[in-house]
Image (cartoon, grey):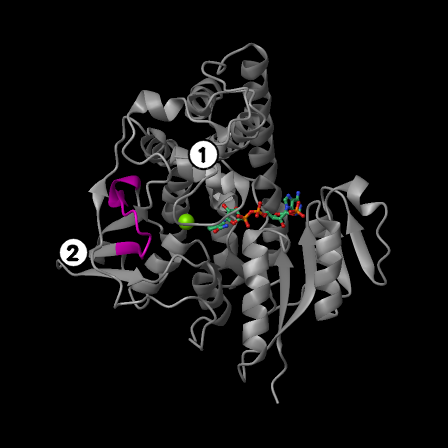
Amino acid sequence: MTQPRRVILLGSTGSIGESTIEVVRNLQAVPGQECQLVGLAAGSRADRLLEQAGEFGVRDIAVANEAKARDIAFDGTLHVGAESARELVESVAQPGDLVVAAIVGSAGIDAVLAAIDAGCDIALANKETLVAAGALVMPRVVERGVNLIPVDSEHSAIFQCLHGVSKEAEIRRLVITASGGPFRGRAREAVREATPEQALDHPTWSMGPKITIDSASMMNKALEVIEAHWLFDVPADKIDVIVHPQSIVHSFVEFVDGSVLAQLGPPDMKTPIQCAMTWPDRVEGCSKRLNWEELRSLVFEPLDHEAFPAVMRALDVIRRGGTTGAIFNAANEVAVEAFLDRRVSFGAIVDLVSAAIEAIPSKPVTALADIVEADTAARAFVASEIAAGNGLENVVTSGTSGTD
Ligand code: NDP
Ligand code: MG
């Protein structure tokens, strides 16, 4: 009998983490696809992490938040602190293991690099890793001969459509679909005034708070455009975004001969997670199915770049290269946090990110230190802009609940 595949799940307590746990449970019932969770990492939700470790008999866990880790009684190896996910990978990972990277933000970069160095395959949900550090990650994947398979639904779609395509010259363009988020159809000024409650109310996807805000600002699509550039090695002028409110067509690839391939499915992340975990095999899934009886129409419309300027900024980030991606990502992370704390307006998010990429010079990326330096500079820049009162227009301080 073949051994179950060893899996390390980083970000196990989040939205993708919990969906991955469901997929792991599903795969236990599929002969030849059994998984053994051998490491789990989380940020603060230590109680849930312990439950997961208990259910799957995991002996090695990591908790980033030191205060939350203090009271943990765990009969195994517990890594604690900001470096804990990377330490977990370094101590547990073996060549051929699968690491599911589902930490949110640039906090996930280190652990992904460590996993590649350890010879692990990566199922990558953490898009910020490629946005900030694609220049380091992609060459290292090739050098170490590991597989990096996207989990982000749009990139999973493109990955599946590109299966068997070896020449970039055959691709006319990649078309990334966007739900349009809760503010689709709103004019620029109305979008800029949105409250956190309105921005957190996503029409089609249920996700963690940071990516939900990114979806409302279209920053998620911006990050995905940069992610696609790194994953599929295509230039900015071959990447487009189109709004598709039902989130059923997850993306398209247009080929030079006029053929267009798309991948469809209901908006359920368990499908791309399982696809990444079993690739190139396909086995019985545990996500919702498309109901063709109910499906009547699929709507597509152009993105309103005036109301949502983030995607244009992203194309510019690709063209500028170097550490611009790290600056773009870190500035956004700080701005989103400030928006959720009601310290800046919704419209200020993209303004602060744009100001950061103009103010901080881009440098070539040769080592992780270049990314860390750019990330730190961008965080300091945005924090000082906020402290100076920039980005405060239309900040909503009341707790009115948002219905879109
Ligand atoms: P969540 O906020 O739901 O979960 C984030 C996870 O990361 C949690 O387990 C959290 O732990 C953990 N975490 C946060 N900071 C650290 C840290 N410093 N060290 C270790 N673990 C940490 O986010 P999502 O699951 O929604 O998203 C995860 C990633 O996947 C993001 O990069 C997102 O862009 C991407 N993604 C998500 C999709 C979705 O549908 N949700 C779709 C496509 C991509 P804790 O909760 O315990 O603090
Ligand atoms: Mg996506």
Secondary structure at badge 1 equals helix
| Outermost residue toward the bottom in this view | 1
Q: Nearer the viewer, residue 268 or 283?
A: 268
Along the horizontal axis of the image, is 232 left or right of 52?
left
Magenta segment, which residues? 236-252
Q: In the image, residue 289 lies at what x, y percent?
A: 37, 68
User: Label 1, on which residue?
Assistant: 199
Mark 1 surroundings: few (<14), some (14-19) or many (≥20) residues within 10 A:
many
User: Which is in the foreground here, disc 2 or disc 1?
Assistant: 1
Q: In the image, residue 329 lies at what x, y percent?
A: 49, 34
Give the quarter of the figure containing the N terminus.
Answer: bottom right
User: Label 2, on which residue?
Assistant: 256
**Identity, as a three-letter code, of the amino acid under mark 1:** Ala
Residue 32's quadrant in the figure?
A: bottom right
Q: In the image, residue 305 lies at what x, y percent?
A: 27, 30
Q: Are discs 2 and 1 less than 8 Å apart at CB?
A: no
Along the horizontal axis of the image, is 284 left or right of 185?
right
